[in-house]
């Protein structure tokens, strides 16, 4: 220690002003003492968890269910080739026995198998005589009514479902529920609630305690938008433990601005149930908006099918088939980034315009030759687009997803929609692709209208985002794929 420092603290008979170098030594010494005795111990001390308030912004997984419909053979080929990254599938009861080989491959790889009992269709005049009649619990030539779900019913629908689920190693069963806006039966909600509880008991009794139950609410989107009707549904289900599935009739596939806003607000009104929310039969911009704004925990839809739902005519007798309409369905091909599909001939016609192939052609790994591959292997292209629309959110933190959606996918959709609507194919080529003058004009109008909707949707959701602010409540995250036999798949009712 410097002598000048010692002299400073020793009493002296005369007052002496310390020199500048002495003061410098004193200050240096005091700083060192303060650091080693006070600052360093506090810095290195472990801090209690409750002393730190952190803003949590996790990256939550999105539950993505793929409905396997009629094209299971093609999907089986894509899956075997590693081109179908499925983790959860929905299998319809009427088709399960025809899809056993594909299901066995999925089960071996740890994919969650969800059973759709198709009870809603079996109880609808317009549907029960169609393909759903092959469901094991269908009653030949007869609609399923409330009497079939009574505890003492001779048909034992609930017991049949439980035994079937156990026998086929199902991981999750969609509870047997009905279209709640059915004008012929006003009390399906209470019947369905009782059926859900009965199914849980039946599964436990039949050796299926490990099989989970999810609850599908099948309703009109107008009813869900109505606060009183929404509260009635939430009130009836608030003591059950499940993932809630919403299949809304009449919602449509186009993301209309006001419809989208009301849809998101209505979903927020269901968050009080405290359970994950899966939107069924929905994809596209409307599905992406639900994920980005945290209104839903996941989506369920098919590929080129089962991506919209309309039960408004289910209570009516089916209309006789028009023999002149031909067989087969019209093929619609999803256009990358456009959030819209076009008929095959429309895609061919537009791609002949100057810049058409560049504007319309897929540049993803599924289509090395753009439009040519989109036309020749449509299922593979559509599958890739379906997964990419959800995967884009995977690395984005939850509370950043709204802004990300507005600035990236939605803005890119607007740009692509603007480019495609401005294509000017030669009108003389239309007839070559089976499009008449009226059809060509209609196509141009549809593309122009679509661009306008996307612009307005961006404005509507931007305002909604600014109003909500960062950290707004989000739907509960769904658990990972539930695999039959795993202890974490055990489910009890509250």
Image (cartoon, rainbow, N blue to C red):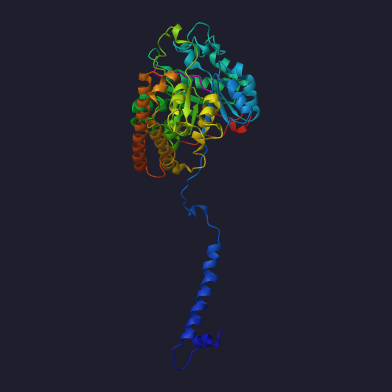
* Quadrant placement of the N terminus: bottom right
Q: Is residue 201 above or below residue 319?
A: below
Q: Residue 384: horizontal and vertical position, in percent? A: 54, 31
The majority secondary structure of the magenta stretch comes to loop
> Magenta span covers which residues?
174-181
The total of numbered circles placed on residues is 0
User: Which is nearer the eye, 419 or 181?
Assistant: 419
Image quadrant in which you'd find residue 266: top left
User: Which is nearer the eye, 239 or 329?
Assistant: 329
Does residue 114 show up? Answer: yes
Q: Is residue 5 above or below residue 343?
A: below
Q: Residue 240: horizontal and vertical position, in percent? A: 48, 28
Q: Is residue 406 above or below residue 247?
A: below
User: Which is nearer the eye, 458 or 197?
Assistant: 458
Q: Residue 317: horizontal and vertical position, in percent? A: 42, 8
Q: Residue 482: horizontal and vertical position, in percent? A: 58, 31
Does residue 163 show up? Answer: no
Queried whether the magenta region covers residue 178, the answer comes back as: yes
Queried whether the magenta region covers residue 87, the answer comes back as: no
């Amino acid at each position: 220690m410097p002598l000048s420092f010692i002299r400073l603290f020793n009493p002296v008979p005369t007052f002496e002003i310390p020199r500048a170098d002495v003061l410098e030594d004193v200050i240096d010494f005091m700083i060192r003492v303060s650091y080693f005795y006070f600052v360093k111990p506090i810095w290195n001390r472990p801090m209690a968890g409750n002393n730190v308030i952190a803003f949590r912004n996790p990256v939550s997984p999105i539950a993505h269910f793929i409905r396997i419909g009629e094209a299971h053979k093609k999907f089986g080929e894509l899956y075997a080739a590693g081109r179908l990254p499925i983790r959860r599938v929905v299998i319809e009861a009427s088709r399960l026995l025809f899809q056993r080989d594909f299901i066995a491959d999925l089960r071996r790889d740890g994919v969650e198998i969800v059973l759709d009992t198709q009870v809603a269709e079996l109880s609808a005049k317009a549907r029960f005589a169609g393909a759903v009649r092959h469901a094991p619990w269908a009653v030949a030539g007869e609609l399923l009514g409330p009497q079939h779900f009574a505890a003492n019913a001779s048909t034992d629908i609930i017991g049949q479902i439980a035994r079937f689920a156990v026998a086929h190693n199902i991981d999750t069963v969609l509870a047997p529920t009905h279209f709640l806006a059915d004008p012929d039966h006003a009390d399906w909600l209470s019947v369905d609630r009782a059926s859900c509880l009965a199914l849980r008991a039946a599964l436990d009794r039949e050796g299926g305690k490990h099989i989970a139950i999810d609850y599908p609410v099948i309703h009109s989107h107008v009813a869900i938008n109505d606060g009183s009707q929404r509260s009635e549904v939430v009130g009836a289900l608030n003591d059950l433990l499940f993932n809630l599935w919403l299949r809304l009739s009449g919602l449509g596939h186009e993301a209309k601005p006001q419809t989208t806003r009301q849809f998101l607000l209505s979903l927020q009104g269901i968050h009080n149930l405290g359970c994950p929310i899966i939107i069924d039969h929905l994809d596209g911009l409307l599905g992406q908006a639900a994920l980005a704004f945290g209104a839903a925990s996941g989506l369920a839809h098919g590929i080129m099918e089962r991506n919209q739902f309309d039960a408004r005519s289910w209570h009516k007798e089916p209309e006789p088939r028009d023999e002149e309409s031909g067989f087969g369905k019209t093929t619609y091909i999803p256009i990358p980034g456009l959030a819209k599909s076009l008929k095959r001939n429309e895609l061919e016609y537009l791609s002949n315009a100057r810049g058409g192939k560049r504007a319309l052609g897929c540049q993803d790994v599924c289509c090395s030759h753009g439009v040519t591959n989109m036309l020749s292997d449509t299922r593979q292209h559509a599958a890739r687009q379906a997964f990419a629309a959800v995967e884009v959110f995977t690395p984005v933190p939850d509370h950043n997803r709204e802004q990300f959606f507005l600035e990236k996918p939605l803005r890119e959709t607007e740009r692509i929609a603007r480019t495609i609507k401005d294509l000017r194919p030669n009108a003389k080529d239309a007839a070559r692709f089976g499009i008449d003058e009226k059809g060509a004009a209609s196509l141009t109008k549809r593309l122009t209208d679509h661009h306008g909707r996307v612009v307005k949707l961006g404005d509507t959701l931007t305002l909604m985002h600014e109003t909500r602010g960062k950290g707004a409540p989000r739907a509960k995250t769904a658990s990972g794929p539930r695999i039959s036999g795993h202890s974490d798949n055990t489910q009890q009712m509250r």
